[in-house]
């Protein structure tokens, strides 16, 4: 008779056989991902609340349940709104991807030079890699609206597309590069959260033109 270990291995192989073709095994403890899609309306996410709903919905559709998800986005003190820092929205960490790899131990680590966020680790909720520089199409621009330390921008310059409500030709949004690469070797080009501002407005086409697709970083806040 097969031993306990053999039975366990048989059961594991049986479960893997039930996965759809191309499906990826995911960690039930996923606490970080890049969205597999954006809102479809450029940087109009329905505000911070709409962005959080997008993260929550994608996580639950992927079978990641029991967590409260927050989009890594800042909001500016414009038009009577209260400024919000992305770093203050995402909990305390640690955060790990769908393969169980830790990308940051805590908020300080996430915004420090030693974080483990890169193309290989910034996976979607499905455990898939996201196209980066050199891929077709390049989609390494991830919406953040944030400065390198995770805080919001002061002053009247719109860097959040009207606090995530615009999808037209006006406005701009700060993006980061999940693959930590750019046109040169400068620190901004390698920044995961503050690489450059979008050009041409806040529409889906404008975001695509600079190497993006309206994707977000999502973190489990609990």
Image (tube, rainbow, N blue to C red):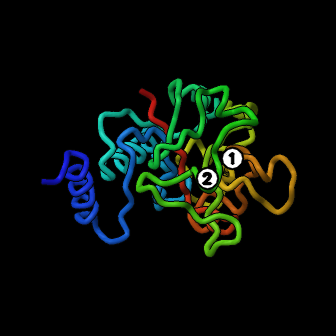
As displayed, is residue 112 above or below residue 197?
above
Q: Quadrant of the C terminus?
A: top left
Quick one: 57 or 110, which is closer to the camera?
110
Q: Position of residue 187 (x, y in %)?
A: 83, 46
Q: Which mark is residue 88?
A: none
* Residue at the image position 69 percent from the left and 33 percent from the top: 111
Q: Quadrant of the N terminus?
A: bottom left
Can you tell which quarter of the image residue 25 is in? bottom left
* Residue at the image position 54 percent from the left and 45 percent from the top: 217
The local secondary structure at tag 2 comes to strand
Residue 122 seen in the figure: yes
Q: Is 92 placed left or right of 49 in the picture?
A: right
Quick one: 150 or 96, which is closer to the camera?
96
Q: Is 69 placed left or right of 81 in the picture?
A: left
- Which residue corresponds to mark 2? 142
User: Please, which residue is most extreme toward the bottom here?
Assistant: 136
Of pointers 1 and 2, the one earlier in the residue sequence: 2
The local secondary structure at tag 1 comes to loop
* Residue at the image position 55 percent from the left and 57 percent from the top: 214
CA separation in Å, label 1 and label 2? 8 Å
Residue 80 seen in the figure: no
* Residue at the image position 46 percent from the left and 49 percent from the top: 99
Q: Residues within 10 Å of mark 1 (few under 14, many from 20)?
A: many
Q: Which mark is residue 192?
A: 1
Check if mark 1's residue and mark 2's residue have beta carbons within 8 Å: yes
Q: Position of residue 16 (x, y in %)?
A: 28, 61
The residue mark sitting in front, 1 or 2, is: 1
């Amino acid at each position: 008779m097969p031993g306990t270990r053999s039975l366990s291995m048989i059961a594991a192989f049986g479960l893997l056989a039930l996965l759809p073709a191309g499906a990826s095994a995911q960690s039930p403890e996923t606490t970080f991902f890049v969205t597999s899609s954006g809102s479809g309306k450029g940087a109009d996410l329905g505000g911070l609340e709409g962005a959080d709903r997008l993260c929550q919905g994608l996580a639950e559709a992927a079978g990641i349940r029991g967590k409260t998800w927050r989009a890594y986005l800042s909001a500016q003190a414009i038009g009577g709104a209260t400024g919000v820092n992305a770093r203050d929205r995402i909990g305390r960490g640690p955060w790990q991807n769908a393969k169980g790899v830790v990308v940051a131990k805590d908020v300080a680590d996430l915004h420090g030079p030693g974080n483990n966020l890169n193309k290989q680790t910034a996976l979607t909720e499905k455990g898939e890699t996201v196209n980066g520089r050199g891929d077709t199409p390049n989609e390494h621009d991830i919406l953040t609206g944030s400065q390198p330390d995770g805080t919001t921008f002061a002053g009247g310059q719109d860097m959040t597309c009207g606090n995530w409500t615009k999808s037209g030709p006006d406005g701009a949004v700060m993006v980061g590069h999940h693959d930590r690469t750019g046109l040169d070797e400068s620190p901004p080009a390698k920044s995961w959260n503050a690489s450059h501002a979008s050009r041409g407005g806040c529409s889906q086409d404008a975001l695509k033109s600079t190497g993006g697709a309206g994707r977000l970083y999502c973190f489990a806040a609990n």
